[in-house]
Image: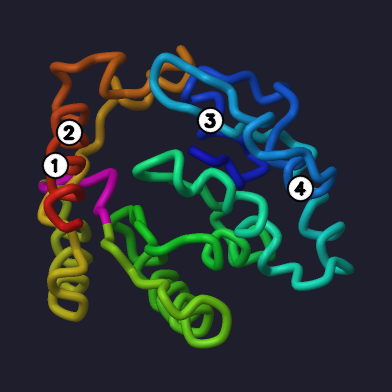
Amino acid sequence: MVDCDPQGNASSGMGVNKSSRPNTYDMLINGVQPEKCIHHTDYSDVIPTGKELAAASVELIQAERREYTLKNALQKLYSDYDYIFIDCPPSLELLTVNSLVAADSVLIPMQCEYYALEGIVDLMTSIRMCSKKLNRRLQVQGIILTMYDARARLTTQVEDELRKHLGSKVYDTVIPRSVRLSEAPSHGIPGVLYDRANKGSKAYMALAAEFLSKE
Protein backbone atom coordinates (compact mmCIF):
# COMPACT_ATOMS: atom_id res chain seq x y z
CA MET A 1 0.00 0.00 0.00
CA VAL A 2 1.40 3.38 -1.07
CA ASP A 3 -0.04 6.36 0.79
CA CYS A 4 -0.17 9.39 -1.53
CA ASP A 5 -2.63 11.39 0.57
CA PRO A 6 -0.95 14.03 2.80
CA GLN A 7 -3.57 13.32 5.48
CA GLY A 8 -1.81 9.99 6.00
CA ASN A 9 -4.97 8.20 7.15
CA ALA A 10 -4.13 5.02 5.24
CA SER A 11 -0.74 4.94 6.97
CA SER A 12 -2.07 5.33 10.51
CA GLY A 13 -4.90 2.93 9.74
CA MET A 14 -2.30 0.28 8.99
CA GLY A 15 -0.45 1.00 12.23
CA VAL A 16 2.37 3.11 10.76
CA ASN A 17 3.13 6.43 12.44
CA LYS A 18 2.62 9.40 10.11
CA SER A 19 6.04 10.76 11.12
CA SER A 20 7.83 7.59 9.99
CA ARG A 21 10.63 8.20 7.51
CA PRO A 22 11.63 7.56 4.79
CA ASN A 23 8.20 7.85 3.23
CA THR A 24 6.34 8.75 0.03
CA TYR A 25 7.68 12.30 0.12
CA ASP A 26 11.26 11.05 0.33
CA MET A 27 10.63 8.69 -2.58
CA LEU A 28 9.09 11.37 -4.81
CA ILE A 29 11.12 14.43 -3.89
CA ASN A 30 14.39 13.23 -2.35
CA GLY A 31 14.96 10.30 -4.71
CA VAL A 32 15.05 7.64 -1.97
CA GLN A 33 14.71 4.16 -3.47
CA PRO A 34 11.21 2.74 -2.94
CA GLU A 35 12.37 -0.43 -1.21
CA LYS A 36 13.98 1.74 1.49
CA CYS A 37 10.66 3.49 2.12
CA ILE A 38 8.72 0.29 2.81
CA HIS A 39 7.56 -0.25 6.39
CA HIS A 40 6.56 -3.84 7.15
CA THR A 41 3.44 -4.34 9.27
CA ASP A 42 1.46 -7.39 10.37
CA TYR A 43 -1.12 -6.53 7.71
CA SER A 44 0.74 -5.27 4.67
CA ASP A 45 3.89 -3.62 3.39
CA VAL A 46 3.31 0.14 3.51
CA ILE A 47 5.03 3.18 2.05
CA PRO A 48 3.59 5.75 4.48
CA THR A 49 3.25 9.49 4.31
CA GLY A 50 2.84 12.52 6.52
CA LYS A 51 1.96 16.20 6.28
CA GLU A 52 5.19 17.05 4.43
CA LEU A 53 3.71 15.42 1.34
CA ALA A 54 1.38 18.43 1.00
CA ALA A 55 4.35 20.38 -0.35
CA ALA A 56 5.11 17.76 -3.01
CA SER A 57 2.50 19.04 -5.48
CA VAL A 58 4.25 22.43 -5.53
CA GLU A 59 7.76 20.97 -5.62
CA LEU A 60 6.88 18.64 -8.49
CA ILE A 61 5.64 21.45 -10.73
CA GLN A 62 9.14 22.19 -11.99
CA ALA A 63 10.05 18.53 -12.46
CA GLU A 64 10.52 17.11 -15.95
CA ARG A 65 7.66 14.73 -16.88
CA ARG A 66 6.23 15.48 -13.46
CA GLU A 67 3.12 13.32 -13.97
CA TYR A 68 5.31 10.21 -14.21
CA THR A 69 7.32 10.71 -11.00
CA LEU A 70 5.41 8.13 -8.95
CA LYS A 71 5.28 5.58 -11.77
CA ASN A 72 9.04 5.83 -12.33
CA ALA A 73 9.69 5.47 -8.60
CA LEU A 74 7.47 2.41 -8.15
CA GLN A 75 8.55 0.46 -11.24
CA LYS A 76 11.18 -1.43 -9.24
CA LEU A 77 8.44 -2.85 -7.01
CA TYR A 78 5.97 -3.98 -9.68
CA SER A 79 7.42 -7.47 -10.00
CA ASP A 80 7.58 -7.98 -6.21
CA TYR A 81 3.85 -7.72 -5.48
CA ASP A 82 0.61 -9.13 -6.87
CA TYR A 83 -1.17 -5.89 -5.99
CA ILE A 84 -0.04 -2.39 -5.11
CA PHE A 85 -2.81 -0.13 -3.81
CA ILE A 86 -2.28 3.63 -3.98
CA ASP A 87 -4.35 5.82 -1.67
CA CYS A 88 -5.04 9.18 -3.35
CA PRO A 89 -6.07 12.62 -2.08
CA PRO A 90 -9.78 13.39 -2.44
CA SER A 91 -9.06 16.23 -4.91
CA LEU A 92 -7.70 16.07 -8.46
CA GLU A 93 -4.23 17.50 -7.87
CA LEU A 94 -0.77 16.56 -9.12
CA LEU A 95 -0.41 13.76 -6.56
CA THR A 96 -3.67 12.23 -7.78
CA VAL A 97 -2.59 12.55 -11.41
CA ASN A 98 0.67 10.79 -10.52
CA SER A 99 -1.34 8.00 -8.93
CA LEU A 100 -3.56 7.62 -11.99
CA VAL A 101 -0.53 7.47 -14.27
CA ALA A 102 1.11 4.81 -12.10
CA ALA A 103 -2.03 2.65 -11.83
CA ASP A 104 -3.58 0.00 -14.04
CA SER A 105 -7.08 0.58 -12.70
CA VAL A 106 -9.06 2.74 -10.30
CA LEU A 107 -11.25 1.72 -7.36
CA ILE A 108 -13.64 4.52 -6.39
CA PRO A 109 -15.17 4.46 -2.89
CA MET A 110 -18.26 6.67 -2.86
CA GLN A 111 -20.60 7.76 -0.10
CA CYS A 112 -24.27 7.53 -0.99
CA GLU A 113 -24.86 11.28 -1.01
CA TYR A 114 -25.96 13.80 -3.64
CA TYR A 115 -22.71 15.78 -3.81
CA ALA A 116 -20.73 12.58 -4.13
CA LEU A 117 -22.91 11.68 -7.11
CA GLU A 118 -22.08 15.04 -8.70
CA GLY A 119 -18.38 14.61 -7.97
CA ILE A 120 -18.12 11.18 -9.56
CA VAL A 121 -19.14 12.64 -12.92
CA ASP A 122 -16.14 14.99 -12.81
CA LEU A 123 -13.87 12.19 -11.61
CA MET A 124 -14.89 9.86 -14.42
CA THR A 125 -14.19 12.67 -16.92
CA SER A 126 -10.74 13.22 -15.40
CA ILE A 127 -9.97 9.50 -15.56
CA ARG A 128 -10.96 9.40 -19.24
CA MET A 129 -8.71 12.38 -19.97
CA CYS A 130 -5.81 10.78 -18.10
CA SER A 131 -6.36 7.52 -19.99
CA LYS A 132 -6.34 9.34 -23.31
CA LYS A 133 -3.31 11.55 -22.72
CA LEU A 134 -1.09 9.98 -20.03
CA ASN A 135 -1.92 6.33 -19.34
CA ARG A 136 -3.75 4.39 -22.04
CA ARG A 137 -4.10 1.24 -19.94
CA LEU A 138 -5.98 3.05 -17.15
CA GLN A 139 -9.55 1.93 -16.54
CA VAL A 140 -12.18 2.11 -13.82
CA GLN A 141 -12.12 -1.23 -12.03
CA GLY A 142 -15.16 -0.51 -9.93
CA ILE A 143 -17.19 1.86 -7.78
CA ILE A 144 -17.82 0.91 -4.14
CA LEU A 145 -20.81 2.29 -2.26
CA THR A 146 -19.77 3.14 1.32
CA MET A 147 -21.52 4.50 4.42
CA TYR A 148 -24.54 2.63 3.06
CA ASP A 149 -27.83 2.97 4.92
CA ALA A 150 -30.64 1.04 3.25
CA ARG A 151 -33.20 2.83 5.42
CA ALA A 152 -32.38 6.20 3.85
CA ARG A 153 -34.27 7.10 0.70
CA LEU A 154 -31.35 9.16 -0.61
CA THR A 155 -29.09 6.12 -0.37
CA THR A 156 -31.34 4.02 -2.57
CA GLN A 157 -31.83 6.90 -5.02
CA VAL A 158 -28.08 7.41 -5.41
CA GLU A 159 -27.56 3.67 -5.81
CA ASP A 160 -30.28 3.43 -8.44
CA GLU A 161 -28.78 6.29 -10.46
CA LEU A 162 -25.29 4.79 -10.33
CA ARG A 163 -26.40 1.31 -11.34
CA LYS A 164 -28.60 2.75 -14.09
CA HIS A 165 -25.77 4.70 -15.72
CA LEU A 166 -22.66 2.69 -14.81
CA GLY A 167 -24.05 -0.86 -14.58
CA SER A 168 -21.46 -3.52 -13.86
CA LYS A 169 -18.88 -0.91 -12.83
CA VAL A 170 -20.75 -0.61 -9.51
CA TYR A 171 -19.85 -3.40 -7.11
CA ASP A 172 -22.67 -5.64 -5.89
CA THR A 173 -21.17 -5.49 -2.41
CA VAL A 174 -21.95 -2.35 -0.40
CA ILE A 175 -20.24 -1.20 2.79
CA PRO A 176 -22.73 -0.33 5.56
CA ARG A 177 -22.29 2.37 8.17
CA SER A 178 -20.51 0.86 11.16
CA VAL A 179 -19.37 2.35 14.44
CA ARG A 180 -16.87 -0.49 14.91
CA LEU A 181 -15.24 0.24 11.55
CA SER A 182 -14.99 3.91 12.55
CA GLU A 183 -13.22 2.95 15.78
CA ALA A 184 -10.56 0.80 14.11
CA PRO A 185 -8.25 3.58 12.78
CA SER A 186 -7.77 5.06 16.25
CA HIS A 187 -6.24 1.72 17.26
CA GLY A 188 -4.03 1.49 14.16
CA ILE A 189 -5.74 -1.74 13.12
CA PRO A 190 -7.60 -2.50 9.88
CA GLY A 191 -11.33 -2.76 10.47
CA VAL A 192 -11.56 -6.38 9.29
CA LEU A 193 -9.15 -7.37 12.07
CA TYR A 194 -10.41 -5.00 14.76
CA ASP A 195 -13.77 -6.76 14.80
CA ARG A 196 -14.07 -9.67 12.36
CA ALA A 197 -17.69 -10.38 13.29
CA ASN A 198 -18.88 -6.85 12.57
CA LYS A 199 -21.21 -6.40 9.58
CA GLY A 200 -18.83 -3.84 8.09
CA SER A 201 -15.88 -6.24 8.31
CA LYS A 202 -17.91 -9.00 6.70
CA ALA A 203 -18.88 -6.60 3.92
CA TYR A 204 -15.23 -5.75 3.24
CA MET A 205 -14.33 -9.43 3.08
CA ALA A 206 -17.15 -9.94 0.59
CA LEU A 207 -15.84 -6.96 -1.36
CA ALA A 208 -12.36 -8.50 -1.49
CA ALA A 209 -13.82 -11.72 -2.88
CA GLU A 210 -15.78 -9.77 -5.51
CA PHE A 211 -12.66 -7.78 -6.41
CA LEU A 212 -10.66 -10.96 -6.98
CA SER A 213 -13.47 -12.46 -9.04
CA LYS A 214 -13.28 -9.50 -11.42
CA GLU A 215 -9.55 -9.87 -12.02
Sequence-first disc among 4 and 1: 4
Sequence-first disc among 1 and 3: 3
In the rendered structure, which amino acid carries the disc numbered 2?
Met
Numbered disc in front, either 4 or 1: 1
Other-residue count near label 4 (Cα within 10 Å), few / some / many at <14 / 14–19 / ≥20: some
x, y percent for residue 23 = 70, 33
Sequence-first disc among 3 and 4: 3
- The residue under the point 62% across, 62% down is 98
Other-residue count near label 2 (Cα within 10 Å), few / some / many at <14 / 14–19 / ≥20: some
In the rendered structure, which amino acid carries the disc numbered 4?
Ala
Q: The residue tagged with tag 1: helix, strand or loop?
A: helix
Other-residue count near label 1 (Cα within 10 Å), few / some / many at <14 / 14–19 / ≥20: few
In the rendered structure, which amino acid carries the disc numbered 3?
Val
Q: The residue tagged with tag 2: helix, strand or loop?
A: helix
Numbered disc in front, either 1 or 2: 1
Q: Quadrant of residue 177?
A: top left
Other-residue count near label 3 (Cα within 10 Å), few / some / many at <14 / 14–19 / ≥20: many
Are the two marked residues, 2 and 3, in contact with CB atoms closer than 8 angstroms?
A: no
Q: Which residues are magenta?
A: 144-150
Q: Which residue is mark 2?
A: 205
Q: Which residue is mark 4?
A: 54
The quarter in which the C terminus is drawn is: bottom left
Which color scheme does this rendered protein use?
A: rainbow
Is 213 above or below relative to 10? Answer: below
Q: Is residue 149 magenta?
A: yes
- The residue under the point 79% across, 52% down is 56
Numbered disc in front, either 3 or 4: 3
Q: Which residue is mark 3?
A: 46
Residue 78, disc: none
In the rendered structure, which amino acid carries the disc numbered 1?
Ala
